[in-house]
Image (tube, helix red, strand yellow):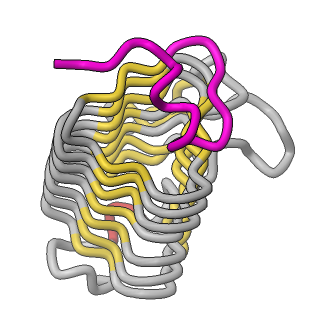
Amino acid sequence: KSRLSTEPLQSVLGVLSVWIDLQRSAIVGNGAIAIAELFIDEGAVIGNHCLIRDHSYIGKNVVVGAHSEVKNSILYDNVEIHHNFIGDSVLDHHCSLGAGTITANKRFDRKNVKVNVDGKRVDTGLRGLGVVVGAGVKTGINVSLMPGLRVKAGTVIRPGKVVDQQNVNKIDYQGDQK
């Protein structure tokens, strides 16, 4: 059963705006802020001082660790993030992002984000697009994932890496540079 009324949540969440569908078994930490249309599914844990905003979906048993921000993103079931920024992105089931992993969602020059499709660069028409991460991806601490990146399922990225569209195919299953 979900709680659609904002009244019982006012004391749990710092700020509440528009609508939030928070499932009964979800846990929300102190100082967490939720803004705009959100869905937080059963068993999800939103840590202390998190910001969840702009049409995000937090799946079943997802852990959004303390001090993380999730903006306009989909985190499928059993994803774990800790002290991260996840913006305009999709994280498939069972992903685990180490502390400090950032999904960049805008190009430095603020032009439209391009993605690689069948070896060709395609303009998405979007100035804000983070990453699409396959199931079971794991990152070490302080990994930077550049805008428009697609990371294949099962990829392991070692700590401290900067991954962009030029080197994503050089990261193999074990996360070592080829």
- Number of labels in the image equals 0
Q: Does the segment drawn in magenta span residue 103? A: no
- What residue lies at 57% left-to-right and 21% top-to-bottom? 124
Q: Position of residue 170 (x, y in %)?
A: 33, 71
Q: Position of residue 129 (x, y in %)?
A: 58, 34
Q: Is residue 156 above or below residue 104?
A: below
- What residue lies at 37% left-to-right and 20% top-to-bottom? 21
Q: Is residue 28 above or below residue 80?
A: above
Q: What quarter of the picture does the N terminus occupy? A: top left
Left of 110 or right of it: where is 159? left
Q: Using the image as rendered, state which of residue 94 and residue 107 is in the foreground.
A: 94
- What residue lies at 53% left-to-right and 45% top-to-bottom? 70
Q: What quarter of the picture does the C terminus occupy? A: bottom left
Q: Which residues are magenta?
A: 1-19
- Chief secondary structure of the magenta portion: loop
- What residue lies at 42% left-to-right and 65% top-to-bottom? 65
| Residue 136 placement: quadrant | bottom left
| Residue 106 placement: quadrant | top right
Q: Is residue 174 above or below residue 112?
A: below
Q: Using the image as rendered, state which of residue 102 and residue 155 is in the foreground.
A: 102
Q: Does the segment drawn in magenta span residue 12? A: yes
Q: Position of residue 109 (x, y in %)?
A: 86, 45
Left of 136 or right of it: where is 124? right
Q: Using the image as rendered, state which of residue 63 and residue 72 is in the foreground.
A: 63
Q: Position of residue 157 (x, y in %)?
A: 32, 76
Q: Is residue 53 above or below residue 87?
A: above
